[in-house]
Amino acid sequence: APPAPWLDKSVHGQMIVMLLACYSGKLEDGEKLVAPLKALGRPVGDLLQRRPYVSLQNLLDATQPKGRRYYWKSEYLPGIEPDLLAKQREHAGRITSPHSAVIVFQLGGAIGDRPVSHSAVGNRDAAAVLNIAASWEKPEDDAANVEWARSSWRDMKRFSTGGTYVNFLTEEETGDRVAAAYGKNLARLTEVKARWDANNLFRMNKNIPPSAG
């Protein structure tokens, strides 16, 4: 828990569970849908309220400031099952930095209304994304935090669809993970890359190499 004014001081720096929800339809319908969440237990903070879209988009920006060190691993999930949540709690309990988190982002909705071939990224049938987000301050803590993320990911990737949500990767990790992320679309993307960027100028992190043909 960050030292935020909307959180009770007794939980600052302590491990917490955060639940984020968004409803973009009629206000009165949204209030009915989130009512069970707002009545759940005794939260240490409650920011679930009406807000403009821009506010929603930058709500978590302060949690990832420039200059901090990051290493993330992610997987697409076919669903959210009890065994996954048990492992999520287990690895969250092993976090080595107060800035790190194990997160599940819900997908679905309009994403699944289009075929896989509609645009670049595949895995449109996934129900959620698992994000193991290591974040820390000092270079001397690199090894411990990277290993926490990697070991957590190795243990939880069994729940994956086999597709990967590509984010921060080392150079040697990138190839296989990009192939998993784009799936059947990768061959088409390499052809597009060869046409528009044959010299592979745009190649950072999520690189799709141009096809040889």
Image (cartoon, rainbow, N blue to C red):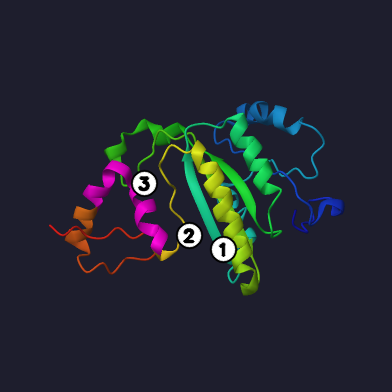
Q: Is residue 84 magenta?
A: no
Q: Is the magenta stretch mostly helix, strand or loop?
A: helix
* Numbered disc 1: secondary structure: strand
Residue 89 visible in the current orientation: yes
Label ID, residue 70: 1
Question: Which quadrant would the C terminus be assigned to in this image?
Answer: bottom left
Give how far across and how far down residue 70 sits, in percent. Answer: 56, 63
Amino acid type for the residue under numbered disc 1: Tyr
Amino acid type for the residue under numbered disc 2: Phe
Residue labelled with disc 3: 180
First in residue order: circle 2 vs circle 3: 2
Rounded to the nearest angstrom, the CA distance separating label 1 from label 2 is: 8 Å
Residue at image coords 26%, 60% = 209
Residue at image coords 67%, 31% = 34
* Numbered disc 3: secondary structure: helix
CB under 8 Å between discs 1 and 2: yes
CB under 8 Å between discs 3 and 1: no
Q: Which of 65 and 153 is in front in this view?
A: 153
Region of the chain picked out in magenta, as a range: 172-189
Residue labelled with disc 2: 168
Amino acid type for the residue under numbered disc 3: Ala
Query: Pointer 2: residues within 10 angstroms few (<14), some, or many (20+)?
Result: some
Q: Quadrant of residue 9?
A: bottom right
As displayed, is residue 29 above or below residue 69?
above
Residue 50 visible in the current orientation: no
Q: Which label sits in the foreground, 3 or 1?
A: 3
